[in-house]
Each structure stands twice: as structure tokens, then as C-alpha cells.
């Protein structure tokens, strides 16, 4: 275990545009920025490495204040990253294990705010970005993949220091011996998404990639789907029956289905009416056969309120509920389990190390409380290279059966990256990406799965180093000397 100091860091911002508009909750995404962080960390002997991480600046998810514009949301996310980086660059810290450094940063930036404070999720974004860059740097310094780094506990991970009930948990026994060869894709069906060619409107892209749900199923061999709903039971029922009609013509068996409420349901009675409505038709019952869970139907501010959870037992008896936007801090998931929620989403933007802790809480709940508890793999429009690859590796380490993927559908492949990086991605991660006719590259999905073999490299799941001179910098930064 190497104690680390963070010496330098810089943030970079690339503009990105969707090929298809992405509607989730009350927001529609058409353009935003991809924020990248690189930092240099050094151990006590003067050995160091540069680590990297990146995330899309998704508006109206971390902060859904209707008074704020998408541009203000994006500026707030950049500020979250800047503030988290400034904390670890303050010079006030002695060399610490990566886990102790992360724990200190989480306490300073997130846990210092009261439970339920609206800025907690926003601040987690910056903490998680620094966390992943540190994991990348330490793994490169050790010459290990992210899985090997964890199996050797080179970061000094001690789960009982965060959750005392995890004392005695053999967390390394939960880890796979190697990453699985592939992971199943759960395809997102947004609220604006055309289902068949008849739904395509003017301006639909002619870029050779699937544009409709029907085309995506045929092209990728998909067998799992995440469907967005928006809080109106009758409207959502009509949409789900339309989706079921399309999928029923393409698939011999009911697919694995999850529903994402994005905080749009005001109460669980309305969600119950949606489930009741689906039971009244053959298409609806067919869809319900594969329904695995409903993600975050209630607003985050009401998700830990016992009064707002009246009727949870009745709904959870039919389908488990998963915490997503309301998962903003150390206490969130344990409180949710006590109230009747049964799952929590994994997203790297909420902290991979918290997801590892959640894995332990699920085991503790099953063994000590005799109830179901699980993690789900969800997307926040992860794009290649770093966000996508680090999230795939994290999901595989956590043993998730599938993971929501949507960035490849709403954005065109690797077009947001400089040409040299696209070419290197095809060389170094050819199992994960495929060349496109006429140039460029895209995610390779075959039989509904993505390959993971090339992610087993020193560092956090990427053999490609960004060409930083081709990514606009948000500040002068300091020179980073380590490879």
C-alpha cells in the first residue's frame, strides 16, 4: 500500500453533440461537454504516475432546479470538479493511502453537508472524478489492472471504517478472479425515441447506425432494455405497450426490462396504477414477465420520508425499487434499505468505491435481515474512452449481470475524440470498438454484449493515453512529468 500525494492536476473540456435527442425525466439533451481530469500523484519515494478520468456534463440530473439553465448545470458540475481537485491540491495533507485520501475528500466535500442537502449529489460528481483519476494513477504506478489493484488491496480499502456493520466482511472474496469476457447491454429507450421507421421524423441521421428501437435490436442482438417513464400512469402505459408491441415481434421470450422514473412519480399509488394497467392486456403482461425493477420513481427529497413511502410494501411486493438520484452520501443506501427500497444504482459518477461498499451492504442485508438487496448498473450517457471503459470495468468488478448503455446510441461512436485517439482505440481495444465505413469508430455490440478483454491493462481500464494537447484546457495547469 503506497501513501500518495497529489501534486498537479488539470481539467479539459470537449464539446459534444448528440446524433439523436435524448429525453429523460423533464430534460432533453442535445449538446453538452465532456469533462476530463488528469492528475499527477506521487508516493513517499518520489515515484509517480499520471491518472485520468472523464464524465459527461449531463444537465438536469445532478440538480433538477427548474430555475437553472442547462448551461448553469454544466458550470456547476465543472465547479464541483474544480473544488474537489483544489481540496487534494491544498498542500495540507500528509501522504495517505488512496482509501484514506478518498474518505477524507468525501467527508470534506459531501458528508459535511446535512443529509438531504440538494448539493450533495452535485459534490459527489467532483469527488468521484478525482477518485477515478487517483485509482488510475495508483494502478499505473503499481503496474496493475484495476481488478488486480483491488485484489491486492493496494489502496488500503477498509469498509468497516465507513460502515461498521461491514466489520469482518471478506470483500476481496467477492471480487472475480478475472474480468468476465463480456457484459450484457441493457439498451435505453428514451421518451422521444422512435420505435420503428414509421416514427422517424425529418432530420433523422443517415449515418449508418441504428436510429430506432427496432433497428437497434436487429443490429446488436439486444435482449435487455431500460425504458424511461415520466409519471403519468395512463401515458406511460400507452408508451410501454407500444414498446412491448415492437419487442414482441422481434424477441421469442420476454426480455429483461427495467423502468426508470427519473423522480417523475409523485407517489407510489400512481406507480401501482401503472402496474395495474399493464396487467390488463397481453402485451402488458408479457412485458411485466421480464420486469426486474423500477428505478427512482419518487423525487429524491421524498425518497427517505416514511410518509411519502406509504404503499411501498405493496409495490415492492410486485417489483423492487432501486435508489438512484436519492443516493447521495454514505447513509443514503442503509436508510433506504430500512425503509423498504431493495436496490441501489451503480454509477461511476456517484463513486465506484461507494458502489464497492454497497456490495457489502447488500450481503450484510441478505445475511442479517434475510431480505433481497442488490446493485444495478446504470448509465449517465457514458462515452468512450475513459467514462465508458472505466464504468464497464467497474460494473464487471462488481459482478453486475448487465449494465445500461446509451451513449453509443445517442452520440455517434467516437466522433467526439480526436482522430489519433480513435485510431489508437481501434488498435488497443479492438474487441470493444469497430471501424465505421468512411472513417471513425463505434462501440462493438454483438449478441447483445460488449467484450471486456482489452480492459485488463495497467491502470483503470484504458490502454490509450489522451492526446492532451488536442483537448481544450480549462486552465494553464502545471506540467505533469510522469508517463
Image: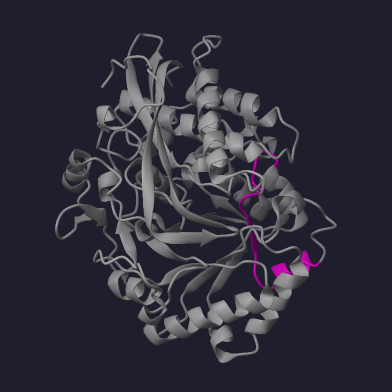
Residue at 67% across / 61% down in the picture?
264
Q: Position of residue 118 (x, y in %)?
A: 70, 40
**Residue 297 sits above or below residue 176 on the image:** below
Q: Residue furthest right?
A: 307
**Residue 294 sits above or below residue 305 on the image:** below
State which quadrant residue 448 falls in: bottom left
- In the rendered image, the quadrant that contains the N terminus is top left
**Residue 292 sits above or below residue 362 on the image:** below
State which quadrant residue 470 falls in: top left
Instruction: Inspect the magenta stretch and tell me whether residue 323 lies in it.
Output: yes
User: 172 and 372: which one is in front?
Assistant: 372
Q: Which residues are magenta?
A: 311-331
Residue at 64% across / 33% down in the picture?
162
Q: Position of residue 38 (x, y in %)?
A: 37, 26
Instruction: Inspect the magenta stretch and tell me whether residue 262 lies in it.
Output: no
User: 279 and 336: which one is in front?
Assistant: 279
Q: Position of residue 81 (x, y in %)?
A: 51, 30
Amino acid at each position: 500500500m503506497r501513501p500518495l500525494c497529489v501534486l498537479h492536476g488539470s481539467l479539459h473540456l470537449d464539446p459534444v453533440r448528440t446524433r439523436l435527442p435524448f429525453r429523460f425525466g423533464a430534460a432533453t439533451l442535445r449538446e453538452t461537454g465532456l469533462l476530463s481530469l488528469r492528475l499527477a500523484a506521487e508516493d513517499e519515494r518520489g515515484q509517480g504516475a499520471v491518472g485520468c478520468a472523464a464524465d459527461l456534463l449531463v444537465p438536469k440530473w445532478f440538480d433538477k432546479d427548474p430555475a437553472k439553465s442547462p448551461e448553469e448545470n454544466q458550470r456547476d458540475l465543472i465547479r464541483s470538479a474544480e473544488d474537489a481537485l483544489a481540496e487534494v491540491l491544498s498542500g495540507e495533507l500528509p501522504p495517505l493511502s488512496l482509501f484514506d485520501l478518498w474518505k477524507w475528500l468525501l467527508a470534506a466535500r459531501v458528508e459535511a453537508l446535512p443529509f438531504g442537502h440538494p448539493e450533495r449529489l452535485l459534490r459527489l460528481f467532483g469527488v468521484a472524478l478525482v477518485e477515478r483519476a487517483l485509482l488510475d494513477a495508483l494502478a499505473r504506478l503499481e503496474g496493475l489492472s484495476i481488478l488486480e489493484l483491488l485484489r491486492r488491496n493496494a489502496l488500503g480499502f477498509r469498509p468497516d471504517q465507513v460502515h461498521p456493520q461491514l466489520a469482518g466482511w471478506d470483500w476481496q472474496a467477492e471480487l472475480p478472479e478475472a474480468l468476465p469476457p463480456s457484459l450484457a447491454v441493457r439498451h435505453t429507450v428514451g421518451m422521444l425515441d422512435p420505435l420503428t421507421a414509421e416514427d422517424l421524423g425529418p432530420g433523422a441521421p443517415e449515418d449508418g447506425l441504428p436510429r430506432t428501437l427496432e433497428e437497434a435490436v436487429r443490429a446488436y442482438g439486444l435482449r435487455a432494455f431500460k425504458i424511461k417513464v415520466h409519471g403519468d400512469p395512463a401515458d406511460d402505459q400507452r408508451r410501454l405497450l407500444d414498446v412491448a408491441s415492437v419487442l414482441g415481434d422481434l424477441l421469442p421470450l420476454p426480455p429483461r426490462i427495467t423502468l426508470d422514473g427519473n423522480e417523475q412519480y409523485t407517489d407510489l399509488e400512481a406507480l401501482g396504477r401503472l402496474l395495474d394497467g399493464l396487467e390488463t392486456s397481453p402485451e402488458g403482461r408479457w412485458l411485466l414477465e421480464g420486469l426486474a425493477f423500477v428505478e427512482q420513481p419518487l423525487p429524491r427529497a421524498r425518497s427517505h420520508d416514511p410518509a411519502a413511502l406509504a404503499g411501498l410494501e405493496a409495490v415492492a411486493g410486485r417489483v423492487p425499487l432501486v435508489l438512484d438520484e436519492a443516493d447521495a452520501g454514505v447513509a443514503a443506501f442503509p436508510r433506504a434499505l430500512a425503509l423498504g427500497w431493495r436496490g441501489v444504482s451503480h454509477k461511476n459518477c456517484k463513486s465506484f468505491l461507494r458502489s464497492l461498499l454497497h456490495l457489502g451492504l447488500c450481503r450484510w442485508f441478505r445475511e442479517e435481515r434475510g431480505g433481497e438487496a442488490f446493485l444495478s448498473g446504470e448509465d449517465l450517457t457514458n462515452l468512450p474512452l475513459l467514462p465508458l471503459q472505466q464504468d464497464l470495468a467497474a460494473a464487471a468488478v462488481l459482478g453486475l449481470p448487465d449494465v445500461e448503455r446509451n451513449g453509443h446510441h445517442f452520440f455517434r461512436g467516437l466522433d467526439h475524440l480526436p482522430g489519433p485517439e480513435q485510431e489508437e482505440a481501434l488498435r488497443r481495444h479492438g474487441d470493444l470498438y469497430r471501424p465505421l465505413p468512411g472513417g471513425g469508430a463505434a462501440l462493438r455490440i454483438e449478441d447483445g454484449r460488449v467484450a471486456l478483454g482489452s480492459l485488463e491493462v495497467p491502470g483503470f481500464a484504458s490502454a490509450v493515453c489522451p492526446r492532451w494537447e488536442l483537448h481544450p484546457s480549462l486552465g494553464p495547469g502545471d506540467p505533469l512529468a510522469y508517463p
